[in-house]
Image (tube, rainbow, N blue to C red):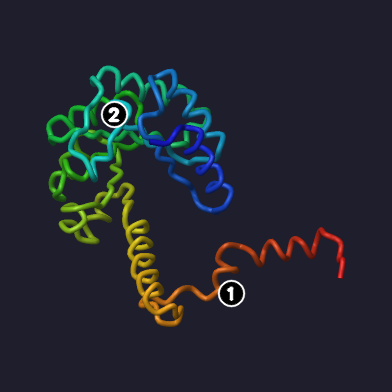
Amino acid sequence: LYTMTENLSVVRAVCHAVPVPVMADCDTGYGNAINVMRTVREFEAAGAASLTLEDQVSPKKCPAVSDATSLLPIEEAVGKIRAAVAARRDPSMAIIARTDARTPEEAIARGKAYAAAGADVIKPISKCFDTFEGLVTLREAVQRPLAISLLGKLQRNLTTQQIEALGGICTFPLLPLLTAAAALQSNLAALRQTLQPEAVPIAPMREMDFRQWIGFDDVEALERQFLPDTR
């Protein structure tokens, strides 16, 4: 479990590094409704375009790996969404209310309450709605766009057309991490056996391409522009 300042530091760095809007996952908001207000102001100042706040009891558990999740009473969860909406200074920064409810009925009830409290987007967990029809029912009930994380059955059950028809936000939260983990595991296992970088099963990025990708060429251009030539 990481702290608010640890997450904030990473989000600020990402916002400075990329030219696209950044969605910040703020877990439970790092406390009660008053703590949430500070969280919103800090992440908004860092440059986040949206904040996701969930209704689990803190410390939270990731539903992708654990079924032992506990929810806040709905009244307290609603208060945190109301506080988040009141705290933001820019109304275009989206408040995404995530519910970890495990049944469609409770997810719909909580989604409607969070929408009424001012949430701009409603986000269910993948274990609750695993069909397109269920997500359509939720969207019609809450009258808000949905944020969908494609995991497990939901990832397998939705077509590209259905994902686009939902018209909200779609993320594949574990795919980049699992892809990198698989590549590291495969390549380092092969390297340990052969000690030959050329023998790894997944070709690494070329060093020059990596330099360009991380912006090192831009840094060197700035050095030539602003630093004295000491050659």
Q: How many marks?
A: 2
Callout 2–callout 1 Cβ contact below 8 Å: no
Question: In this view of the protein, which residue sits in the foreground, 197 or 83?
Answer: 197
Quadrant containing the C terminus is bottom right
Residue beneath disc 1: 208
- The three-letter code of the residue at mark 2 reads Asp
Q: Amino acid at mark 1?
A: Met
The quarter of the rendered structure image containing the N terminus is top left
- Residue for point 57% across, 52% down: 17
The answer to whether residue 219 is left or right of residue 179 is right
Q: Residue at x 82, y 59 (%)?
A: 227
| The image quarter in which residue 178 lies | bottom left
Residue 80 image point, x, y percent: 36, 22
Identify which residue is drawn at 39% across, 19% down. 33
Q: Residues within 10 Å of mark 2 (few under 14, many from 20)?
A: many
Locate residue 127: give its quadrant: top left
Residue 180 location, quadrant: bottom left
Q: Which numbered mark, 2 or 1, is in the foreground of this view? A: 1
Answer few, some or many: residues within 10 Å of disc 1's Cα (few below 14, many 20 plus, some between 14 and 19). Answer: few
Circle 2: element type: loop
Q: Closer to the camera, 218 or 136? A: 218
**Residue 190 picture location, percent across and down:** 36, 75
Check the image and report above or below for 35 versus 137.
above
Depth check: 136 or 202 in front? 202
| Above or below 154: residue 139 | above
Q: Which mark is residue 55?
A: 2
Residue 87 in percent (x, y) is at 48, 23
Q: CA distance from mark 2 to mark 1?
A: 45 Å
Mark sitting on residue 175: none
Which structural element holds mark 1? helix
Task: Tell which circle, 2 or 1, labels the residue nearer the N-terminal end.
Answer: 2
State left or right for residue 47 relative to residue 99: right
